Amino acid sequence: MLKYALLRLLGAIPTLLLVIVLAFLMVHAAPGGPFDDERVLSAEIEANIAAAYHLDEPLHRQFYRYFAGLLQGDLGPSYRYRDHTVSELIGTAFPISLKLGTMAMLLAVVFGVAAGSFAALRRNTLPDRSVMAFAMTGISIPVFVIAPVLVLLLAVKLQWLPAGWSGNEGAARFLLPVIALALPQVAYIARLTRASMIDVLASDFVRTARAQGLGTTAIVRYHALKPAMLPVLSYMGPAIAAILTGSVVVEEIFGIPGLGQFFVRAALNRDYTLVLGIVIFYATLVILLNLVVDILYGAIDPRIRQR
Amino acid sequence: MSLLSVAGLTIRYDDAIAVNGLSFAIEKGESVGLVGESGSGKSQTALAILGLLPAQADVSGDIRFEKTALLGASERALDSVRAQRLAIVFQDPAQALNPFVRIGQQLRRILLQHGLAEGAQAQARVIDMLRRVGLSDPERQYRAYPHQLSGGMRQRAMIASALITEPELLIADEPTTALDVTVQAQILELLEDIRKDTALLLITHDLGVVAGHCERMLVLKQGELVEQGATRDVFARPQHEHTARLLAAAPRLDRTDIPTTTTGAELLTIKGASVSYRETGHARLQAVRDVDLTIRAGETVALVGESGSGKSSLARAVLGLVPLQSGRVAFCGTALEGLAQDRATAVRRGMQLVFQDPVGSLNPQMRVANIVAEPLLVHEPDASADTRQQQVIAILEKTGLGEEFLERYPHELSGGEAQRVAIARALILKPKVLVCDEAVAALDGTVREQILALLHEVQIDSGLSIVFITHDLSVVRGISHRVLVMYMGALVELADNNALFEQPRHPYTRALLAAVPVPDPERAGGKATLAGEVPSALAPPSGCTFHPRCPHARDICKTEIPEQRTINSTTVACHRAEEI
Amino acid sequence: MTTLFNIWRRMRENRAVMVSGGILIGIVIVAIVGPLISPHDYLQTNFDNLLQRPGTAGFHLFGTDDLGRDLFVRSMLGVQITIVVAVVASVVSLVIGVMYGAVAGYVGGRVDAIMMRFVDTLYALPFIFFVILLMVAFERNFLLIFVAIGAINWLDMARIVRGQTLSLREREFVDAARLTGVSTAAIIMRHIAPNLLGVVIVYVTLTIPQAILVESFLSFLGLGIQEPQTSLGALVDAGVNQMEGASWMLLIPAGLLATILLCFNFFGDAMRDVFDSRSER
């Protein structure tokens, strides 16, 4: 088991390197520099700026410099927020996004698995159909549609909940953003759980368990739940990526000063170093979380662990 | 009062009737065989008794376990009968045991659920049960996951799970169909020994199994009971013509109409053939080791062995579907090089293959006419469509199919029809050698006999040579001139039909013959004379690979690979062939 | 395995396929014909008629936006662009994915292992962020949107096609063809491709809504389709800014987008049933 985990960890390293190289090249292959749209600068000043940011060096030198910094957690200076380094900005903004994302993820797994199992056990009944209709709607409607519509309905029209972030305190301000972020994932996980639970309940070993007189509760608990959770577990990787993506939109809409908002601003402002830094940060996060999921998978499925 | 009584059981699906008005009873402690071909409704009956039929099944009639009505009973009521009084063993233990739960936990759960034992006592009882079904080191198997056990061990664990509650009736639904013949014999003997007062309902397609293990038998045909009675009586004097037909189709080792040796010219020579596959990681799996074989024109040679014996790999390498690791193959005097697609046209025409799964060997998107005509497109590209059509019709007719089949798709064919189409496709190029890889294993007895008769006919007509690959020695007896027995990739014994069956030289051949169930209650068959199962091909035993299971093994067998020797025209690879 | 000739029959028997397919065709027809017969065009501003409510006045069925432009025509333009982008991107992912997956699956062995390891590696990346990076680096290039979205979606397609090809390659009818000497090209054309068609069709119908989602996401953030062109994502973005005063500016494009996505998902889901061999009996 430990060997399995270590192998997985080693396997993640090339992926991380690939991410860094790819992202770095993309930014540096861009036509035009980051300061092109500012006032026309004299050649001298432009050269000074380039020198200050080491833009005058050959690409591999720049990469080497960047990579060396990266290993020490230094992602370089931001082009726009000139008093801050990229690492500082990430350090400030990420905790908020993390809180938001974790809550959304928990919500998604708990409600998704519960709704999906419920539907699977009442297959083809009205409750099942309602849950599935809801889930289909949930996966079809993008976060950036759900979020503003929720705000319009619950905050603007009914005024039950606060709409914005600033000027509000406490848990209430998390409610709408978390719901908006979690809803598509609740829906997806519900569908996944239902499908896989139905598959497992139709398997031969469940038939054996029924023949042994175990009854539905014991069958689900001791035989079906674990295998039925495997597809959900393998969806955790994509789900994490989806929640990160969603957080970009949700933070923008609710005005939450998280990493997603920084990212969008940086993208629109063409703050290359900040965008690059955040992409690398996000990618590393996703790769590491995927790793955790992989290892968990091995812990649940004895057949995988063996290899 | 009977232990189990079934009256007027009828099971319907939409428009199809699976079981129609079935009535029978089982008394305490007796063993009853339920036989029939596929689709006769025997498994449906078992599921109905346990209340496990799918929701869309429309069931009527009456099923009683002593006084308790099972049909229409609530799940809760059924759960109090299931396991405790009525248990089942399913066909494929690889599917029927939960791959995610340790064997011991699966068994312990049954005891806990029914309040039969608790805590350490439950664990002790499970371990004891595992020991009783013949699992060595039961403490370790208690903690094992199903995939860590071999097929036979898993079925033992399955039997343990069924009998741990000491039920009054055990239903065994084709319990040995997924297993090798030597293991089948072990499992059937185990069932016999261990069940004590538990009544047994043994569901099978194999009359040999019924003859050896059941006091009474029931014969089903398309959902209807056509005959029942004491096993001896039914075998001696079948009353219904369907029973008679089944009995006639059951292959027997003691049949007399066996093919005599032929003396055609040498057609295909295989010298020192070896095949290996790369496995995950760096391991190499040695599938075939150093096999010699010559096939003459017009003869049938059977390749016989259990799973993993390398019989299919040998044939596939000769045909050029997998590469030969070493050795030489010559066809009509020319050496064969490379894979099928690199070989000369005449060679490719000369050797054809028929597969096990009749429907799977036909492309589901193509009509029969195009499937059969495809080889012609390659080998006679200049022929007109009309000529091709004529040839297709002619060959289909030869295999017993009319023109109405031309436009059909594979899924519109029965198993037997699909296999005829596959044979037609193979024969349309007029090959000299036809390889049949378990070509009748998936077919019912009566259909199997028809296909075998067809092959025989073709051989008489055209002097075709047939290489017949099978795990089933009893089929071999009636059709092959010579038999090659393989074990773990190597030749064990090569002999004429009569010599092999009358005077087997190798201990493995003898064990195989003893293990074959005989469809005759008066003659004992299906004896388990071998312990254990075939070892993993990734870690073959030293010396003679058979020595760990061999009752005659000596020290030399553990260290030295036996050389082949010839005794009265029989080739055998055994150190002690002369003495035993 | 379903034969192709009875697919259409089974599609017609499937109510979800017919209803969702019908709605989609309806929306596309209105999106094409609507702007042609409307007296307005998508650029024309009218500062005397800002934020008019939906209704028949001035023939502004969906009202006007904060620049007085006709929202009906702009929404229909958005539908057009959204669907064109999604379909083209899906075709891109289809071509890359099928070729990559088929080669990996048919060649097999070490080549397959390396090719799939590469896919697994890419799979672990949060692609959308790379797309945004790309958008930042190369301006908001229209062509790039297709490429970027296609580049995300081909991974799934490659995996599925590879798995299918791998199992088809092992099928006995392929062995039978190899044995008689049918060429590799003919085996792929006659025996592999027709049997892949089912999963590919199902998967493409499920790729389209994903592509729509990515495009509208980018446009919503202002990184996709640029003014004066528009897409449903960009219209939702504009709607969010005006939602307190003019909720229709949010609700109309949001509703259209949701309907289109819902229909595509229903359609793809139902197509899976159509091709599912288990429901054949």
Image: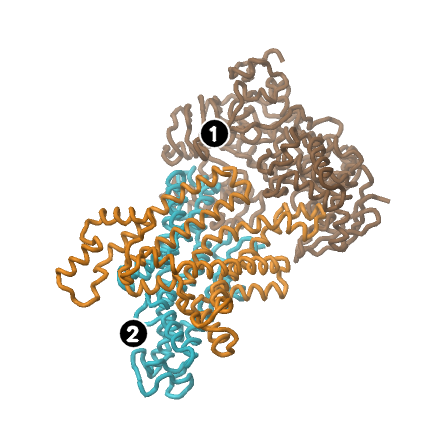
Chain colours: A orange, B brown, C cyan
Kindly identify which numbered label has been placed on residue C228. 2
The picture places residue B318, in percent across and down from the top left corner, at 44, 29
Q: Are marks 2 and 1 on the same chain?
A: no
Inter-mark Cα distance, 2 to 1: 66 Å
Query: Helix or strand or loop: what does disc 2 sit on?
Result: loop
For disc 1, the marked residue is B285
Question: In the rendered structure, which amino acid carries the disc numbered 2?
Answer: Pro
Q: Indicate left or right for A66 with A154 as reference.
A: left
Q: Residue placed at 65% from the left, 28% from the top?
A: B136
Question: In the rendered structure, which amino acid carries the disc numbered 1?
Answer: Leu
Please state which of the two labelled residues, at mark 2 or mark 1, is closer to the viewer. 2
The picture places residue A49, in percent across and down from the top left corner, at 19, 58
Name the subunit of mark 1.
Answer: B
Q: Indicate left or right for C97 with B516 as reference.
A: left
Query: Which of the two residues, B53 or A199, is positioned nearer the viewer here?
Result: A199
For mark 2, does the 10 Å Cα neighbourhood hold few (<14), some (14 to 19), or many (20 or more) residues? few
Rendered position, A203 above or below B327: below
Total numbered labels: 2
Rendered position, C189 above or below B423: below
Query: Helix or strand or loop: what does disc 1 sit on?
Result: strand
Q: Residue placed at 37% from the left, 87% from the top?
A: C58
Query: Which of the two residues, B176 or B233, is positioned nearer the viewer here?
Result: B176
Query: Can residue B219 be seen in this snapshot?
Result: no
